[in-house]
Amino acid sequence: MIATQAKLVYQLNKYHNERCQARKAAIAKTIREVCKVVSDVLKEVEVQEPRFISSLSEIDARFEGMEVISPNEFEVVLYLNQMGVFNFVDDGSLPGCAVLKLSDGRKRSMSLWVEFITASGYLSARKIRSRFQTLVAQAVDKCSYRDVVKMVADTSEVRLRIRERYVVQITPAFKCTGIWPRSAAQWPMPHIPWPGPNRVAEVKAEGFNLLSKECYSLTGKQSSAESDAWVLQFSEAENRLLMAGCRKKCLSVLKTLRDRHLELPGQPLQNYHMKTLLLYECEKHPRETDWDESCLGDRLNGILLQLISCLQCRRCPHYFLPNLDLFQGKPHSALEAAAKQAWRLAREILTNAKSLDKL
């Protein structure tokens, strides 16, 4: 048994050093190319409208605010200034979303975003996005990369297609630090020892983001109040939780397997699903020794089996917001196809570690 585990860990490390590192290098190269274009577009936007200041910056060879959705799809979060005069309201009526309400009607004129405030005093995510979309469309026509970049039509999101190969979504957002959403109040579960009080305090201080984008839990039934809502996002908090042990290596292997074998019609599975299941696995195995390099094979198998279970049940709860189902709106046939493919993958890895050479 131990020999089998050791063999799997050896093969996974080999897979990580070859396939995962190659994926990483290719994505890093793409990001550089994409960020050049996006920075140029955002520079033009800033000239027209100084309230939309580009926050895309490179720190230690990483671009802050850049999320990789898949090797050809990215999201750039554009942080907006001065949320000050608004209260954050999340009463759970919109899973995964919250609203920003004027703290005092008399402060309306003091807001930097005065023309995007609704009659009832909410800062409308939709109105800000709509204005931003107009500015980006104008900037695309003026920027020096206009021959290789164009707007993606038929969406209220701000999406750019670059060199006919890559899609980048640019999402206006507010950073919220020092508060924690009520809809995530159940975290951490009192009976689960991971991640421990110090790490919890760090994560909660890190805060979360409010994004102006279509909320997939509301698709198809958006009333005006709902389209004014902002989407909660916890990427910094999640990354902080995955720092120790072999967690990041495990995520890298999962993302590479997904990109190579689970990129299916209807897009049932994204890398974010893998990250979510990894966080749940951390709760199931709360001891740091469970995340030793020697346990990489066990952890990976556990996550793949959990993935199959979620796909079969057609439900994958968000880690911090369990009322939000990350499979909502995904076609059942696509989830079924993904379950079958994930099962093939898991069976191959479980029964023959050397199959990773071919995967």
Image (cartoon, rainbow, N blue to C red):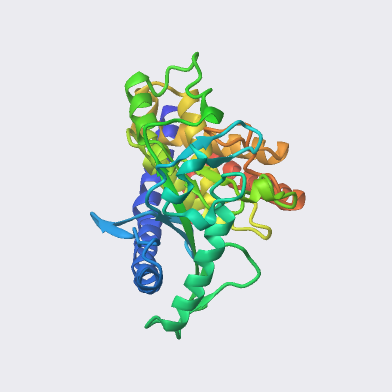
Q: Is 26 in front, or is 352? A: 26
Question: Where does residue 312 sit, x and y in percent of width and height?
Answer: 71, 39
Residue 277 lies, with reference to residue 344, above or below; the image says above
Report the residue that reaches farthest toward the bottom: 147
Q: Is 16 in front, or is 100? A: 100
Residue 216 shows in the view: no
Describe residue 246's horizontal placement relative to residue 353 as left or right.
left
Q: Residue at x 51, y 51 (%)?
A: 257
Q: Residue at x 37, y 58 (%)?
A: 24
Question: Where does residue 241 sit, x and y in percent of width and height?
Answer: 38, 33
Residue 182 lies, with reference to residue 191, above or below; the image says below
Residue 329 lies, with reference to residue 158, above or below; the image says above
The image quadrant that residue 157 belongs to is bottom right
Q: Is 306 in front, or is 153? A: 153
Question: Where does residue 67 sit, x and y in percent of width and height?
Answer: 43, 54
Describe residue 296's horizontal placement relative to residue 186 as left or right.
left
Residue 89 lies, with reference to residue 121, above or below; the image says above
Q: Residue at x 48, y 54 (%)?
A: 114
Report the residue that reaches farthest toward the left: 60
Question: Where does residue 234 sit, x and y in percent of width and height?
Answer: 46, 40
Report the residue that reaches farthest toward the front: 106
Residue 235 shows in the view: yes
Q: Is 350 in front, or is 275? A: 275
